[in-house]
Image (tube, grey):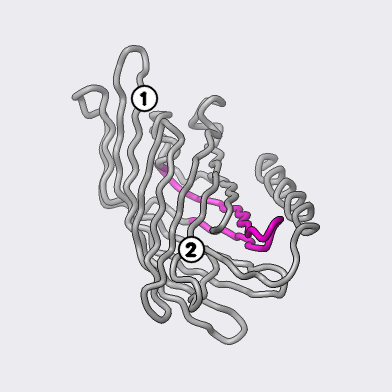
Amino acid sequence: MNDHRYLLHCLGLVLTALSAYAGGGVHEYYAYPKYDTVQSFVGLVGASVTFVPRPIAEEEIRQIPFVDLRGRLNVSSGLSVVAHTGTNYLTSLASLGAQWVTPLGPVDIGIGDEELLWYGRATMDEFDVHAIGYLNVPSLSVGIETSEFLLTVRAEMLFLTYRTTRVGDLEIASDKNQRLGASLGICVEQPYAHKTHLLLGLKVNSLRNAYQSWLAFSTFNDPLLYPELSIGLIF
């Protein structure tokens, strides 16, 4: 619980500090569920860190940051193709999906679905350990637009299609066709210094057998909270 309060406190301090640099309306955005008629492609480069719960992971693998690269291609009115790749050396992932957005009264909404592939590999005590998994991630986003920033709340469900972990050629664990849990996130997009735009996000994942903890070899199957912080520059 102290970790979660610390994350919220840090996010509040960062948003307060960045407000001094913001000015004018928001011209570029990645996560906000609105169709951009001016810019057909939007990219984001940044980093994210997921805090793996203490019951299943040692301190040295609890919070290894990811380097993220994301893209959103507006293909027709309301419809976008989204892609994401990221790595922290031990784990790499790639996803591809689609999102449909539309205004609804005072807010904007987006309905999406993504297919995600992740792969992890490490050498431990002279053994080659690797794992691979496939996920399906449907989502619902709700956005509120202001003159200074864009606020997006996004809810996701995570379904495991297939997962296997091997030591050398020996399979030591496998799962398939499971509902892993859900995620709820909030992000802010706003202008930053020198005409750049910034995304700041906080997400809470309630999951069992999350890919972020594959190296812990945990048999703990109850849902646990995985807080996640993200930051990125939009281009």
Q: Are marks 1 and 2 in contact (CB under 8 Å)?
A: no
Q: Which mark is residue 42?
A: 2
Which residue is at the far left?
A: 169
**223 versus 198 height, above or below:** above
Give the amino acid type for the residue marked by disc 2 in the picture. Answer: Val
Give the amino acid type for the residue marked by disc 1 in the picture. Answer: Ala
Q: Quadrant of the C terminus?
A: bottom right
Q: Magenta stretch containing residue 87, yes or no? A: no
Instruction: Name which of mark 1 and mark 2 comes first in the sequence.
Output: 2
Residue at left offset 38%, top offset 39%: 92
Secondary structure at badge 2 equals strand
- Please state the horizontal and vertical placement of residue 99, each as a whole percent of the image: 40, 70
Q: In this rendering, would 7 be left or right of 110?
A: right
Judging depth in this view, the residue of 161 and 76 nearest the camera is: 76
* Part of the protein shown in magenta: 183-210
Residue at left offset 32%, top offset 12%: 126
Secondary structure at badge 1 equals strand
Q: Which mark is residue 122?
A: 1
Q: Is residue 169 visible?
A: yes
Q: In this rendering, would 165 be left or right of 185?
A: left
